[in-house]
Image (cartoon, helix red, strand yellow):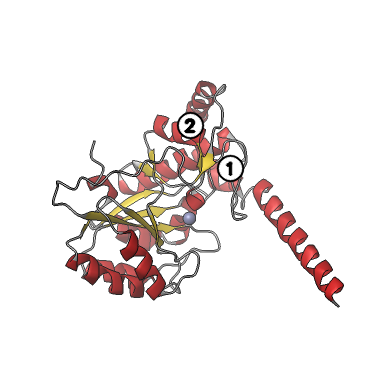
Amino acid sequence: MLVHKKILLLALAAFFALAAGAAAKKPRGDERSTFRSYYTPDYLAFKARIMEEFSKAKAGKFSEFVNYRRKETDKSLDQKVIAFTFDACGGKHSGYNKELIDYLRKEQIPATLFITGIWIEKNKETFAELAKDPLFEIENHGMMHRLCSTEGRTMYGVHGTRNLSDVVDEMELGARKIAELTGRRPVFFRSATAYTDELSLKVAKRLGMEVVSYDILAGDATRSGAARMSKNILSGARHGAVVIMHFNHPEWPEKAALEKAVPELRKRGFTFCKLEDFTVK
Ligand SMILES: [Zn+2]
C-alpha cells in the first residue's frame, strides 16, 4: 500500500514537473494575432536595434530582487509614506475586483496599478475608467504577462519569455498599448511573478522604464486570508515600502485586508502615494 502511494506521488511530481516545463516553452495564446498590429516596419527596425545593442550581453542573475535596493529609511525625516501596488495579470485571471477599487476611491488612497495588455483587452471600459481617475497611476505589467528572462527561465510554471526578442516585445508593446490608450507612457515595469534577470533590467532601462519589485508581499497570491494579509502589511510597514497585491481576482480579500490595515497605518502616521510621486530622483 505504502509503495503504491510512493509511486503515485512520484508520478504526480513527474507530471507537475513536465507541466511546468511545457509552460516554460509553449508560447502563450495566439501571440501572432495579438502582436500583428504592433509589428510595423518601424517597430521591427526599433526592436532589431535594441537586439543588436544587447547581442553580447549576459543574462546575469535571475531573481525577484535583481539589483533591487531597499531604500533606507531616513529617521531624521518625519515622513512615513507607503506605496500600494496592485497587479492585473490577465489570461485566465482577467477579473476585476470592483469592491477593492471602490474602497480605494472611498478612502482616497492613491495606488499604482500594474496592468497587462491582455487584461486591458478583456476590460476595455474598466481600463478607460481607471486610467482617467487621478487617484491611480497606470504602469506596465507586460503585454502578455510573461515573466521576463532573456534565457527562457521561469518560475511557478508561469509562461516566460523565450529570449531577448520576447523580452523587448513584452516590455515595449505593453508600454505602447498603455501609451496609445492613455496618452501617458508607463515609467515602471513589473515582470510577471516579479522575477527577472539582470539583462532584462538593462533592457527596461533602455526602453525608459524602471523595473519594480516589492518590499512587502501582502500574500493574496498565496491565498492568505484578510487577517494574515493585514498582519503582513503592518509588520513590514516602513517609510518607502512598496506593497504588492492584485486587483484581478474579485474573490480575493484585499479589501477586507486593507480595511484592517489602513486605519492602523494611518494611526501610525503613514500616508499613501503612487510610485511616480514617490521615486526621489
Ligand atoms: Zn501578474
The quarter of the picture where the N terminus appears is bottom right
Element assignment for label 2: helix
Q: In the figure, is residue 253 to the left or right of 155? A: left
Q: Nearer the viewer, mark 2 or mark 1?
A: 1
* Quadrant position of residue 123: bottom left
Q: In the figure, is residue 223 to the left or right of 152? A: left
Q: Is residue 38 visible?
A: yes
Element assignment for label 1: loop
What x and y, as percent, mark residue 272?
23, 58
Q: Which mark is residue 161?
A: 1
Three-letter amino acid code of the residue under disc 2 = Tyr
What x and y, as percent, mark residue 244?
39, 57
Front-lying residue, 240 or 138: 240
Residue 74 versus residue 223 in the image, above or below: above
What x and y, as percent, mark residue 161?
58, 42
What x and y, as percent, mark residue 144?
52, 49
The quarter of the picture where the C terminus appears is top left
Q: Which mark is residue 43?
A: 2
Q: Which mark is residue 83?
A: none
Q: Residue at 50% x, 21% y: name it.
A: 53
Q: Residue at 43% x, 47% y: name it.
A: 190
Three-letter amino acid code of the residue under disc 1 = Thr
Residue 138 versus residue 201 in the image, above or below: below
Q: Residues within 10 Å of mark 1 (few under 14, many from 20)?
A: many
